[in-house]
Structures are given as structure tokens and as C-alpha cells.
Image (cartoon, grey):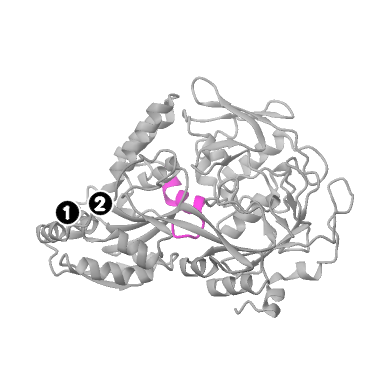
Amino acid sequence: MQLSRRSFLRAAGASAALAGIPALAACGAPADAAAPRLVASFAGTGPLGAPDPHRVWRPVDRARAAAVADTLLVWDQDMTARPHLAASVGPDRTGTRWRVRLRDALAHDGRPITAADALASLRRVADPATGASAGPLLTNLDTAASRAVSATALELVLYTPDFLFPLVLGAPGTGVVREGRGDRPVGTGAFRFLPGAQDALYRHDGHWLGRPPSPAVEFVVDDDEENRYQALVDGLVHWAHDLFPHSARRLLGRTGTTVVSAPGSATRFLDVGPAPAAGTGEEAGPFGDPRLTEAVRLGIDRTELVHEVLLDLAEPGDDLFGPGLAGHPAGRAPVARDVAGARELVVAAGASGLRVPLLFDPFDPMSRPAADLVAEQLAAAGLRCVPREPDPPDAGPTPGIRFRRAAATPVPLHLRAAAGPAPGSADTTADTTADTTAGTTGDTVPSADAGRSDVRALLATASRVPDEARRTEALHRALVLLRDRSTVWSSGDEHVGVSADLSGVEPARPDTGTWARFHRMRMG
């Protein structure tokens, strides 16, 4: 869809027709309808329905959810948790009981949000019937034993000790709404939903952080990145999410628009596999041979990839997830290219001259230009890489090398997804956690990593010990263990295009407490 002025209004839907309707504050007073509304564009398709703060699979869903419903905690830029709607969160000495105290906050109906509302919201998220995006993160919460202690305090009870539990309370999709009703959300967010105005959210004058400058935020979606860029340049939108590096370069130095980039927002992998499932008795073959993974690690030129594909708007990868995030061991230098060493490993793995599928990441357009360069680089090591689309998911994993982009998320949650559930466990977290925290950005965990008992053991240690130093050591060791199936070639930025008349936009990694927070932004 070409996001022209006409199609822009069509995409905006019912909210454009309601642009002249003044939003009402929680107390009933009219908001300043003369002030300009803020228009934000995202990748995706429409029309947009009512924002359900517990079903947030796409970035636009998470941005709308954060606008209408505050979470108890939020993630900082290093992906640690800090208080938000909760004034304080603390465990008992066992790590199985957590006391949460709410701050005074008025909901959109003019009444204070309560601990009972918070508990009802978490119970809805945890209920498998809801289909909540963050549901797998709450499998350790005993919703029956948890209780509201008072109007402003609740006790959350866990089945097993977890001193990392605050990260879950800051996850997207855990917003607190009146009586836990996500279908018609009445939250404490800076903006509120009006039935009939599907694509716009209107200012909540009684927000506990103060009255937002803009009377409304209008959301438009378009899967064509060039359309999102052009709509920004033409003045149709004020905030354009997830622009490609070449668009970010075009905006730099341009009069009337700018770009705000958040470093370390996405880790890009090359996964080699899959390996045969444990206990099957199958031969590993070259794609289950760690020497082939090491050959890929030595055979690529990360600096050239970052320069040619990401236009230097990234850093070469250090082969571990999440540079700059809490739990990532800092100070590791990227692996230097060693073509001769890579060629020796390819021969030793029996893969010399092997025709190797090089599979695009369907959710990362940058994997396509990167594939041609990777194929050229690995040819020098004796691999005949053939870039192509991946097979359909129901066809099963394809042996080969695959691109994967993982958005920044707390390291423990990334490790939980990569480790997979314990054998016989009903926990489905491993299948969905990566998508929960990053929506449709292709953050799936390679099947070859599923069932990592060694990583699960270290995660259990990190969860059950109150000592932060021991937790960090366990997380470092777990990340290093995952290195044997993947190569990280870059740690890239996320780019947001911003119009000249919009201020207050901060560099923010996705899903953090300052990402897409439109109540911080001012038009004019």
C-alpha cells in the first residue's frame, strides 16, 4: 500500500473521522483539542482493533499496550527491571513470595487502580485460554495462592524460587487493567482507548507521571519500509519505527527530519544446524559437527558485513547474545577472520565443496544483502553457500546455515528460551519466550539449541541464589555455552525517524521503559 495522503487517511481509519472529537480527561474535563496530535507509523497491516495489553505480538501492539496500560515494572536500557506502576517489589528470603506495593495511580475511569486489578491482570495473562503473549513467562506463578493483601499491596507466590522474577513483571504484555479485562482496557496509561476510535489513543490527563503534551496519538501501519520513510519525509507521520540503515543514512543531515538510533538493539546470528536430536542414534553429519560451526565463525568477515550491509550503524559481533545488556560478559573482542583455519575445519568436518543452504531470516530484510556477502566470504573456506528462502515451518528444520535476528531482551529470558523445557516438563516457555519479548522480529531460537540441560542448570542457579554476583557468573557461563551452535556477526542499532517538530524522543532499545513512550514527546 502506498502511504500517500489519501491512503494515510484510509489507514488511519475511524480515528481520522473522530479527529474533531475532544478527548475527555478522567475527571471529565475536556483536553486541549487545539494541540496537534502525534502520528506514529509501524510495520504491519491493519486495521488496528482495540489494544489488548495482554496480546502484544507486534511492535505496534506493544507500543499501544504501553500507552494504555502500565506494567508493574519496566526494563531499563541494560534490560534490568525497575519500578513503574509498582512503587516497590521485593522477595522473602526464599525467593518464592514477592510483595508488590502499588503507587497511587488513577485509571482512565477516574478511580485508583488496585492490587486486585493487578492480580486479575496477571491471572488473565497466565491463563492459557487467553493466548497472552507473555503467558509462558508466568508458568512459575501460583495464581491460586497469590492474593491481594490490601488495596495497594499484593503477594505473588511462585512454585519455585526465582530471584529473577522482577524481569517477568516488566515484560511487554503484562499491563495492569481494571479487573484484568484486556478486551476493553481501562488502565493507568498516559493514553486511553475510546471505542469507535480504533487507531488513535487519547490523552489521560490524570496520568501519575503528568499530563501528556499531545491530546492523542494516532497509529498507522505499513509493511513497506520505503512508504514509512516517505511518509515521514512528506510530513504525514511524526515518528517512524524500524527504519533500515540506508533510510537512517538518508535522514542524517537532512533538514526537517532526523533519526534517533539505539545501539545494541538487535543481535544478528548465523546458526549452523540442526544437530540430530539427543538419543536418536543418528549420525551428526557436517551440520551437527561443531567444527563446521567454528569454520563459519572463522570464515566470515564481521567488519565487512557491518560496513557493507548495516552501513557501519552497528558493531561487529562478539559471538554472544546481547552486548551491552546486564548478564553479558563485556570486553570480548570479535573473532578475527582466519580463512586458512576455516578451510582446515571444513575439510575435517567432511564438508569441503558441500552445497550448503544459506537461509534468509523471513523477519529480517537485512539478511538478504548479507547472504550474498556471507556466501562470498565462506566460498574462500570451501563452502558452496546457496542463499534462499527457508522452508515452511511445517516442513521441519532444514540442515544448513540460517540467519536469525534477536531483539534486545533480558539475558535470562533469552537463555530460558534457548535452553528449552526440561524433559517431560509442561513448560512451553522455550517455544514462545523469544517471540513474546520481541514480537515478529524473527527472534526464534534454533531448534538445535532446544533441550540444553547445561544451560538450564545454570539458569536454575541464577534463579535460586539471592547473591547478584553469583547470578551474573551463572548467566555469563550459560551464554558462553550457547556459543557452540551460533555465530554472532553484528550487534545492530534500531532506527526511528523523527520529524523536526517532535521533541523528547530518546534513544531506546525496544520494549524498554523509554521506547515508544509518547507521553514524553511534544509536538511543536
Name the residue located 57 percent from the left edge and 71 percent from the top edge: 229
Was residue 430 drawn as part of the magenta stretch in this picture? Answer: yes
Q: Quadrant of residue 326?
A: top left
User: Taking 57 as reference, is 18 above or below it?
Assistant: below
Q: Dot 2: within a 10 Å radius of its alpha carbon, few (fewer than 14), some, or many (20 or more) residues?
A: some
Indicate the position of residue 474 as horizontal and vertical percent values: 35, 33
Which structural element holds mark 1? helix
Q: Which residue is mark 1?
A: 291
Query: Residue 306 shows which numbered tag?
Result: none
Residue type highlighted by circle 1: Arg
Q: Quadrant of residue 84?
A: top right
Indicate the position of residue 516 as horizontal and vertical percent values: 62, 54
Which structural element holds mark 2? loop
Name the residue located 75 percent from the left edge and 48 percent from the top edge: 186
Decide which of 332, 366 is in the foreground and name it.
332
Q: Which residue is mark 2?
A: 335
Residue type highlighted by circle 2: Val
Q: Quadrant of residue 47?
A: bottom right
What is the count of numbered marks? 2
Was residue 84 drawn as part of the magenta stretch in this picture? Answer: no
Mark 1 or mark 2: whose residue is earlier in sequence: 1
Decide which of 276, 248 is in the foreground and name it.
248
User: Taking 337 as reference, is 155 above or below it?
Assistant: above
Magenta segment? 426-443
Indicate the position of residue 523 as horizontal and vertical percent values: 73, 59
Image quadrant containing the C terminus:
bottom right
Indicate the position of residue 102 as horizontal and vertical percent values: 69, 32
